[in-house]
Image: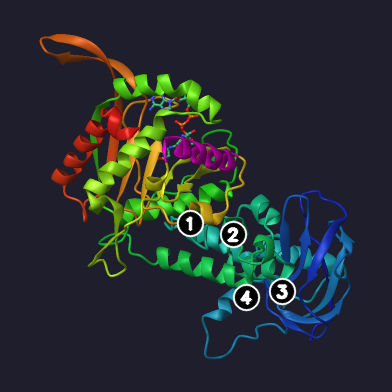
């Protein structure tokens, strides 16, 4: 065994007195080149310092909680004897020969040797674990979806709620903690969460690029074209994004459009305003749209169904739990009005308002977003005309509603101004035929014109 070399904290971007949050090796332990030795945490990121060479830990010189800066002594390491390659693996020899730090005796300044050896090995001196770097290489070779090999978002990794050992584990796998949903206490990320995440990514990455697999989106280094700023998606965006993508990819979507003449119901809404205010509720067009949808769902029960897990049976729901997309500062959520068919107009308005308020304040409980049977996405308060809402799978249809505008309608030999509401119904074509969807929207538009039926 060669005489020990000093392994020092490498360049950590000028940070000083950073915390050692984990010591990952013990005296006497054999390590490989790149084995993480300690985890340190700067304001920006937690990072592992890997071993510059293979060998035996002679003496660990720091402990968890210590503060270190560039050049601080981490440990003494006895480098392994030169060329330890097994005879049955001749291919290893050139690699050993190419690593001078491993074969040459350490110069007098042992610390320098460690750093120099690390530099020669390109990644060894870098306080970012090798798997992440290796992964980056893989990603440029065409693994375009998020895979364990995607570049790690260091800030999000650092901010993630996880123990040092889980951080270390994630580093070893090149998993980005910033992308993992914690299932532990208070959302803490567990080792099982990391495993499940990596498994999912590997499954996705192993899909072929052609044939039945999804074609990949190219990886682009945007910074090559100008200044950029990287911001993580919100927790809600990550969750809803995955669900939206699953629906878009699994359900054959078709969107059917229609205009509903809501002039009469708007007049009725106006007439009810005072009464509604007295009852402490705000009547918006959505309240009546919900009521009209329930009438249509009762008439066309397939729109209130779901395919079962086998994909061979339809589950018809006898309840009418209406979800509505709510735009919140943190992203899209879909609260559900349970048994909306059993509520009167003001009760629907009250529930809609209280759930919307909770959604915007980020206070919705999980149970308040479960059990929907049909969803409405209303952009009517914002504007725009028609759009293609994505079905809230496993539901089979969703109604998109846009802003009502006055339009000339030809009636009895002349044009009259009518308030027209654009409707966009997306449906799962495995379950619903185009003709049935057209009948549904025609029925719905008629119901929205029938004041008596809606009140
Ligand atoms: N046409 C014309 N005006 C409309 C309208 C329509 N279709 N729908 C609502 N309005 C009016 C309302 O009457 C209200 O005006 P007043 O204050 O003068 O009465 C104003 O627009 C704002 O309404 P609102 O948005 O506060 O209330 P709402 O009940 O219509 O909607 C909610 C509640 C939670 C659905 C809505 O606030 C929201 O978040 N919408 C966005 C949904 C979304 O992001 N969908 C896309 C998801 S991706 O598919």
Secondary structure beneath disc 1?
loop
Q: CA distance from mark 1 to mark 4?
A: 35 Å
- Above or below residue 368? Residue 66 is below
Q: In terms of sequence position, does the residue under pointer 1 or pointer 4 come before the other?
A: 4
* Residue 284 percent across, percent down from the top left: 44, 28
Q: Disc 1 marks which residue?
A: 146
Q: Which residues are magenta?
A: 344-360
- Above or below residue 240? Residue 381 is above
> From the viewer's perspective, is 129 left or right of 308?
right
Secondary structure beneath disc 4?
helix
Q: CA distance from mark 3 to mark 1?
A: 31 Å
Between 401 and 322, the one nearer to me in the picture: 322
Q: In terms of sequence position, does the residue under pointer 4 or pointer 2 come before the other?
A: 4
User: Which callout, 1 or 4, points to the residue nearer the camera?
Assistant: 1
Q: Residue 350 colored magenta? A: yes
Q: Is mark 2 within 8 Å of ligand 1?
A: no
Residue beneath the point at 53% across and 25% down: 277
- Above or below residue 445? Residue 115 is below
Q: Which class describes the residues within 10 Å of circle 3: few (<14), some (14-19), or many (20+)? A: many
Q: Residue furthest bottom?
A: 87
User: Is the C terminus in the top left, top right, bottom left or bottom right quadrant?
Assistant: top left
Q: In terms of sequence position, does the residue under pointer 4 or pointer 3 come before the other?
A: 3
């Amino acid at each position: 065994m060669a005489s020990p070399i000093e392994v020092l904290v490498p360049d950590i971007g000028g940070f000083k007195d950073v915390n050692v949050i984990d010591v990952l090796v013990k005296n006497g332990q054999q390590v490989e080149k790149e084995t993480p030795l300690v985890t340190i945490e700067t304001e920006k990121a937690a990072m592992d310092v890997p071993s510059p060479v293979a060998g035996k830990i002679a003496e660990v010189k720091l402990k968890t909680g210590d503060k270190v800066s560039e050049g601080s002594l981490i440990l003494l390491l006895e480098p392994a004897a030169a060329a330890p390659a097994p005879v049955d693996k001749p291919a290893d020899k050139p690699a050993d020969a190419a690593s001078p730090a491993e074969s040459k005796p350490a110069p007098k300044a042992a610390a320098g040797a460690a750093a120099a050896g690390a530099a020669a090995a390109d990644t060894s001196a870098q306080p970012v674990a090798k798997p992440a770097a290796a992964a980056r290489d893989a990603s440029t070779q065409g693994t375009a979806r998020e895979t364990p090999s995607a570049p790690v978002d260091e800030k999000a990794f650092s901010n993630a709620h996880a123990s040092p050992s889980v951080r270390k584990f994630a580093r070893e796998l090149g998993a980005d903690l910033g992308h993992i949903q914690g299932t532990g206490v208070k959302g803490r990320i567990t080792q099982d969460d990391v495993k499940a995440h990596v498994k999912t990514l590997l499954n996705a990455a192993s899909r072929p690029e052609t044939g039945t697999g999804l074609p990949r989106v190219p990886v682009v280094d945007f910074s090559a074209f100008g200044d950029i700023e990287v911001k993580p998606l919100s927790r809600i965006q990550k969750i809803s994004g995955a669900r939206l993508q699953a629906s878009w990819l699994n359900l054959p979507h078709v969107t059917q459009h229609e205009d509903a003449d809501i002039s009469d119901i708007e007049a009725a809404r106006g007439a009810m305003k005072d009464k509604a205010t007295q009852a402490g509720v705000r009547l918006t067009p959505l309240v009546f749209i919900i009521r009209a949808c329930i009438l249509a769902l009762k008439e066309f029960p397939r729109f209130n169904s779901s395919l079962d897990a086998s994909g061979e049976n339809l589950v018809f729901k006898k309840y009418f739990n209406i979800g509505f997309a709510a735009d919140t500062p943190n992203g899209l959520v879909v609260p559900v009005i349970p048994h909306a068919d059993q509520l009167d107009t003001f009760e629907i308005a009250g529930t809609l308002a209280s759930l919307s308020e909770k959604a915007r304040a980020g206070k919705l409980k999980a149970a308040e977003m479960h059990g929907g049977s049909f969803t409405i996405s209303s952009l009517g308060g914002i504007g725009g005309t028609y759009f293609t809402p994505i079905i809230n799978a496993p539901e089979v249809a969703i109604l998109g509603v846009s802003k009502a505008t006055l339009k000339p309608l030809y009636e009895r030999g002349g044009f009259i101004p009518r308030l027209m509401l654009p409707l966009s119904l997306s449906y799962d074509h495995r379950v619903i035929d185009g003709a049935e969807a057209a009948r549904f929207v025609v029925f719905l538009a008629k119901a929205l014109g029938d004041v008596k039926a809606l009140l």
